[in-house]
Image (tube, helix red, strand yellow):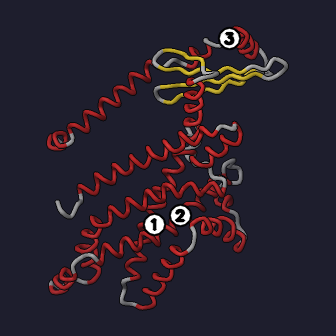
Amino acid sequence: MKAFCKKYSRQLIIIAIIIVAIIILGILKPSRETLLSHTSPEMQKMIEADENSTRKRVTVTYNSLFIINYASLSTSGANVMSEHYVGFLGKVYPADEGPMKVVGQMVNYTYRMLGTGENLMHGAKLTILLTTLTVLFGLLLGTVLALGKISKKKVLSKISSAYIFFFRGTPLLIQLFVVYFTVPGIFGFAWRDLFNSSDAEAVYKGAFVAAVIAFALNSGAYCAEIVRSAIQSIDKGQFEAAKALGMSYGQTMTRIVIPQSIRRMIPNVSNEFIMILKDASLVFAISLMDITTISKNIMTSEGSYLVFIPALVIYLVITALFGFVFNKIEKKFSVYE
């Protein structure tokens, strides 16, 4: 533990400073009630009237993002009003125009894309979950395909090679359509049937399962080539040495070859993860609410092209975080250490 702390002392200090700063800024962030208390007298009267009425005239949208929050209020009826406020560092700023309007919009868009306060599979969370499951299943399938392709059994080798050729040679979007639309049409079922018919999100969950299957089948083909190249990069002398020691093919692969191959495939698996992360935006085609779909919906409903800026930043942050993790793993398991 001491050696670990000493080796990563600088990184740990930076992380600690960031966490403390976020906590302090979060504590100083004005509350929802504070933001609403800064509304105009007319708006406050309408809010008070709504408390004693079943018919609400004021729509309040409140978004809180760690160190900053945003409140948007709009009224219906004859007297239409709208007010917007941003809370930061203990202060409340009107956000109806100017730079604060842009800041408020960014907070609102980012909040909605992250899926804060929503179902587990929304926005950024859906994108990360889909990518992680895809690569995990893709690696498992890819390992089987890689071993099949380099197998001395011609039938197994040709089947594996044909699978890899097919899924690498056709577009992922078309594969997604086939899995989501064509397969249920042929076999007479619907993906939502996998879940309870009383579940309000059965359609959504079914679409997610279909997306994971389509992405994993595609990723498996690419992971197969990653695994195959890593295995074949191991010196053949090690196979011969293992055979001389009386080890079977399975023992040689599991105890000698694959452990060394894992180290060599990490950089390529990292690239595959990043590629899938960006390809996950294709799920908009089956109406899954990932970052891209939510961004497009916000742009359509509000007519603001600014929404794509936080979308880019979110993708960049996610990519940077996972890139950092894979970089650390690669260094730890480097063949040169």
Instruction: Look at the picture and state if 320 lies above or below 90.
Output: below
- Horizontal side, residue 100 vs residue 237: left or right: right
Residue 228: x and y, percent?
Answer: 35, 76
**Alpha carbons under labels 3 and 1: distance apart:** 56 Å
Q: Amino acid at mark 2?
A: Phe
In the structure shown, which secondary structural element does the residue marked by tag 3 occupy?
A: loop
Nearer the viewer's eye, disc 3 or disc 1?
A: 3
Question: Mark 3 vs mark 1: which is more N-terminal?
Answer: 3
Q: Amino acid at mark 1?
A: Gly
Residue beneath disc 2? 215
The 10 Å Cα crowd at callout 3, few under 14, some 14 to 19, many 20 or more, is few
**Alpha carbons under labels 1 and 2: distance apart:** 8 Å
- Seen as rendered, the residue at the extreme bottom is 154
Nearer the viewer's eye, disc 3 or disc 2?
A: 3
Residue beneath disc 3? 40
Question: Mark 3 vs mark 2: which is more N-terminal?
Answer: 3
**Residue in front for this viewpoint, 116 or 307:** 307
Q: Amino acid at mark 3?
A: Ser
